[in-house]
Image (tube, rainbow, N blue to C red):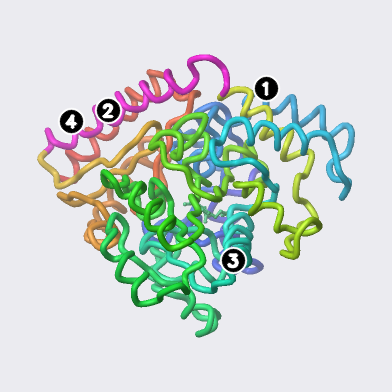
Amino acid sequence: MRKTSCELFAQAQKFIPGGVNSPVRAFRSVGLDPRYIIRGSGSCLFDTDGREYIDFVCSWGAHIAGHAHPHVVEAIKKTADQGTSFGACCELEVQMAEHLVEMVPCIEKVRMVSSGTEATMSAVRLARACTSREKIIKFSGCYHGHADSFLSKAGSGAMTYGIPGTPGVTRGTAADTLNADYNNLEDVKRLLSDNCDQVAAVIVEPVAGNMGVVLPAEGFLQGLRSLCDLHGIILIFDEVITGFRLGPGGAQQHYSVMPDLTTLGKIIGGGLPAAAFGGKKEIMDMLAPVGPVYQAGTLSGNPLALAAGLATLELVREPGFFENLNNHAEEFFKELRNITKETGLAGLMNSIASMGCLFFESGPVTDYASAVKADTQRYADYFHGMLELGIYLAPSQFEAMFVSSAHTDADLSRTLEAHRNVLKALS
Ligand code: KE4
């Protein structure tokens, strides 16, 4: 007899802080206990209590082609038969590197790591090394993983829990992290003049996905590029979410703005732990063993994860993949907006390509300050209602929802119907 979610969560809390290995999974901001998932297939998740859901979390964006895609599973099985990790060079690393150099505009050289956090913290270390400067500028509401440098007014889990900084980060580290308002170039200019010649890098989510979804204002990304050029600063696009999500070349291709370094994750691991950072060869060659900047990882370039990632990249490179997915998703988000408007509830949908967020506020939502005005209790009520109707959304107002190529018309219509019914019940 399977253990229920309730039994498993009670057990988990005895051994794991909060019963979870990542805070947002605890469902605390939506006031529920988490559902224990036993299987994913295509657009669906199945929990241990026998319930089925249409999934819009997609492992936080990794499953752009759906759960357990046969092509990905086959690649993993075939690779696993040969062994899972050698701590040595393997051909799959070369194949992945070639793909990333070919597909991501700014990447001339790339290094694999095992998580988005590793990618962003390594990119920042590299930027500090090649500029001999120490400060970084990030944007309030953006989340770049849980490395010390980033945990100040972070987005995602930290924002969900309202942790403006976090205990355990030293004053020195916090002092080197400057927070600007997203979409506010004047704020960046102010920080640059207050910290003249001290800023090594500007790191930004080119489309923010961790304060809910917030799009770059016209000229914002281009403005960051110009300011970084003017001040000799490394521009880092954190494309852990947007990489291979918006299109083959991510946000930098979509907006035609070229960063110096890019970080990637999620989709390039196909649901297994793989991430990467890459950029101009003269910067990347500062890395050991060529250059003096140390960076390493036992499982970096792990063959199993790269097999899953390469199989996923093969799927997204199929002719028409992004056109079909983005058209489907944009139609779906448009319908979600229309239904929300019909019900008269204060709600607005920010979306681009196959990622979006329904904010429970009248908006517009263009930065951290406007995002936090959202009615998180109303989001929690909405989440409950949708979950009961078999729709699995992010358990936080400050996350993104993702459509995959596995979401069928029937899935999307059912979701729209559920959306209509839940909003009616809330109004
Ligand atoms: P990881 O270290 O969690 O693999 O990646 C950190 C990261 C870096 N950059 C961006 C833009 C990210 O969105 C993330 C991680 N995203 C969150 C979800 N918004 C991961 C989910 C979680 O923390 O459990």
Dot 4 or dot 1, earlier in sequence: 1
Which residue position is annotated with label 2? 417
Say whether marks 4 and 1 touch (CB < 8 Å): no
Dot 2 or dot 1, earlier in sequence: 1
Magenta stretch bounds: 317-343
Task: Reply yes or no: does residue 334 show up in magenta.
Answer: yes
**Residue 35 at what x, y percent from top left?**
51, 48
* Secondary-structure class at tag 4: helix
User: Could you tell me which quadrant the C terminus lies in?
Assistant: top left
Residue positioned 17% across, 38% down in the render: 424
* Secondary-structure class at tag 2: helix
**Spatial distance from mark 2 to mark 4, Cα to Cα?**
12 Å
* Secondary-structure class at tag 1: helix
Q: How crowded is mark 2: few (under 14 residues within 10 Å), some or many (20 or more)?
A: few
Inspect the image, locate mark 1, and give the three-letter code of the amino acid beneath it: His
Residue 71's mark? 1
| Above or below 349: residue 103 | above
* Secondary-structure class at tag 3: helix
